């Protein structure tokens, strides 16, 4: 219905999920999640593209199921897979694109992106899409921004570290994150960094996130401050990068 209402502007994103709470919330075991995900994707594609669709798998079974309305785009909307680990990126090659959150430093990121673009080319996927995400906050005083907002991303990464999904960042955690996906500071810092990303990674899409889960302590931006940050990124960074 979203694809119909937008006249074909929907891009469908999906990912397996990496945290046990995601599965516990819906009463679904983590064990077998890869196979379950692949069955789900086969069902979604089948219901979108076939008038009647039957399926019999390990987890799901459908008999002459019918879904209406069909998508506006034919045969279906593009499907991008969110992936961080190689196993998941390999799965993204089965579909139309890969979305990468938390990329490392540019040298390492370039090697990885080049590798998967080559794999996509071997499969004959000429229009395989690559989207990458960078995060941060804009403000004229760089040190003030780093002090006021950097702790939010440190707290988020520490959440993953405690669960064995991220490394220990060491002493200056904010600086470590700034060497990878985090951008904090005035427009010039953003423009310089994103220009390098555009030149070296050549992403088809670039996502920018400014908000994350609220940490237990420290400053957290309210709605007005968040909107101001988004507006500044649009007017003072994105607009200038486009010219």
Image (spheres, rainbow, N blue to C red):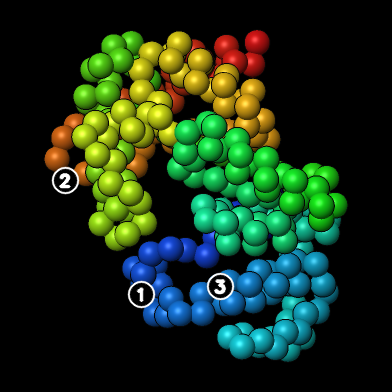
Read off the residue under disc 2: 216
Disc on the earlier residue, 1 or 2: 1
SS assignment at label 1: helix
Image vertical order of residue 41 relative to residue 115, above or below: below
Residue at the left extreme, as displayed: 217
Give the residue drawn at x 83%, y 45%: 126
Label 2, residues with CA under 10 Å away: few <14, some 14-19, many ≥20: few
Q: Nearer the viewer, residue 34 or 60?
A: 34
Read off the residue under disc 1: 24
Disc on the earlier residue, 1 or 3: 1
Query: What's the mark number on residue 34?
Result: 3
Question: Where does residue 221 sit, x and y in percent of width and height?
Answer: 27, 31
Label 3, residues with CA under 10 Å away: few <14, some 14-19, many ≥20: some
Identify the image quadrant of the C terminus: top right
SS assignment at label 3: helix
Tags 3 and 2 touching, CB below 8 Å? no
Question: Where does residue 147 sit, x and y in percent of width and height?
Answer: 21, 24
Of circles 3 and 2, which is in front?
3
Disc on the earlier residue, 3 or 2: 3
Of circles 1 and 3, which is in front?
3
């Amino acid at each position: 219905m979203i694809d119909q209402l937008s006249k074909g502007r929907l891009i469908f994103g999906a990912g397996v999920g990496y945290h046990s709470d995601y599965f516990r919330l819906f009463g679904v075991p983590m064990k077998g999640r890869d196979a379950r995900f692949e069955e789900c994707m086969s069902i979604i594609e089948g219901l979108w593209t076939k008038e009647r669709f039957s399926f019999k798998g390990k987890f799901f079974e459908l008999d002459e199921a019918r879904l209406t309305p069909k998508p506006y785009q034919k045969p279906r909307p593009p499907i991008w897979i969110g992936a961080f680990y190689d196993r998941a990126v390999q799965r993204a090659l089965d579909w139309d694109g890969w979305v990468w959150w938390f990329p490392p430093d540019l040298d390492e990121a370039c090697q990885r992106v080049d590798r998967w673009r080559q794999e996509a080319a071997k499969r004959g996927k000429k229009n395989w899409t690559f989207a990458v995400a960078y995060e941060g906050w804009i403000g004229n005083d760089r040190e003030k921004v780093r002090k006021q907002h950097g702790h939010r991303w440190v707290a988020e990464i520490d959440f993953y570290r405690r669960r064995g999904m991220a490394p220990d960042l060491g002493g200056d955690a904010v600086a470590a994150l700034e060497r990878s996906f985090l951008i904090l500071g005035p427009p010039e810092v953003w423009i310089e960094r994103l220009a390098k990303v555009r030149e070296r990674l050549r992403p088809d899409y670039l996502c920018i996130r400014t908000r994350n889960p609220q940490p237990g302590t420290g400053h957290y931006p309210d709605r007005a401050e968040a909107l101001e940050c988004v507006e500044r990124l649009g007017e003072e960074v994105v607009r200038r990068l486009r010219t």
